[in-house]
Amino acid sequence: MSKPCEAPIGSAPASDQIILALDVNGANEARSIVKEIAGRIGAFKIGLQLFTAAGPSFVREMTSAGHKVFLDLKFHDIPNTVASAAVEAARMGVWMFNVHAMGGSNMMRRTVEEVNEACAREKLARPLIIAVTVLTSVGDDDLAEVGFETTAGDSAVRLATIAAASGLDGVVASPLEAAAIRSTVANKDFVIVTPGIRRASATKDDQRRVNTFRQALANGSTYTVIGRPILSAADRIAAINDICSE
């Protein structure tokens, strides 16, 4: 069976830019989805829900099986705690993990330094380290409520700039900010991961700053995180094809 969203020879299929969010209740359900979808998208995201249910052992199970894992735990604490947690993430063999940019530049720089040192010392594959900017469920009014004087878009670009200056490999930001981040950060290899991807005709659920897969890539997104539009579909393979071809 052919891989969905096939591209011309010499270029990667669009589906490689999809990270499937395994936002499910436990390891058994996740295993079933991985078996169904593996090889048809670029990577799998393990976030707070599944990590809390299944723990580090499931992350290691996934990475040992050769799956690319984006560990989405949004580490946000004092620099020492985040850096130590980040080293453990690297030891689990994840492809990418994130911290929260609002933890500040000291936290981000310390994390990069300690992960680099641990990976060199222990001969580990060094994961991509990215920073969450502003959650796609958060709008301007939410930021104003907690004292921000800038819009969600401006805040995301500023945090992305700080993350880049701190040595991180990229950020998580809404597809609405991808173009501004791409034009602001000088590093052309800076990774922009965008959640909040919806079909043009779909509801937003609890997301507020959303866009389509096509527009996210056009705006400069490197990868897109997609959960419910695929997970809740009666035919998940068809849903992946539809998202790519829309």
Image (tube, rainbow, N blue to C red):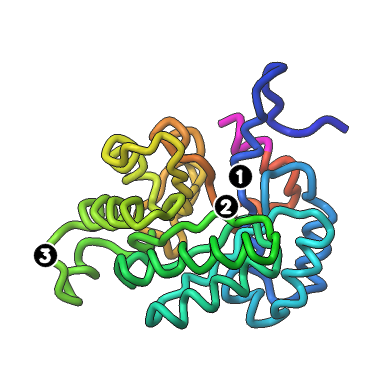
Proximity of marks 1 and 2: CB atoms separated by less than 8 Å: yes
Distance CA(mark 1)–CA(mark 3): 33 Å
Depth check, front residue: 243 or 11: 11
Label 3 crowd (10 A; few <14 / some 14-19 / many >=20): few
Residue plotted at (60% across, 67% down): 118
Residue plotted at (65% across, 22% down): 11
The answer to which image quadrant residue 33 occupies is bottom right
Q: Of label 2 and label 3, which has the lower sequence position?
A: 3
Residue that label 2 marks: 226
Residue that label 1 marks: 18
Q: Could you tell me residue 143's position as x and y percent?
A: 22, 68
The reply to whether residue 11 is visible in this rendering is yes
| Kind of residue at badge 3 | Glu
Q: Main secondary structure of the magenta part?
A: helix
| Kind of residue at badge 1 | Ile
| Kind of residue at badge 2 | Ile
Residue plotted at (69% across, 19% down): 10
Secondary structure of the residue carrying tag 2 is: strand
Q: How many marks?
A: 3
Q: Which portion, as a residue range, is magenta?
A: 241-246
Q: Nearer the viewer, mark 1 or mark 2?
A: 1
The reply to whether residue 232 is visible in this rendering is no
**Residue furthest right in the image:** 1
Label 1 crowd (10 A; few <14 / some 14-19 / many >=20): many
> Is residue 84 magenta-colored?
no
Residue that label 3 marks: 149
Left or right of 65 in this view: 56: left
Q: Nearer the viewer, mark 2 or mark 3?
A: 3
Left or right of 31 in this view: 173: left
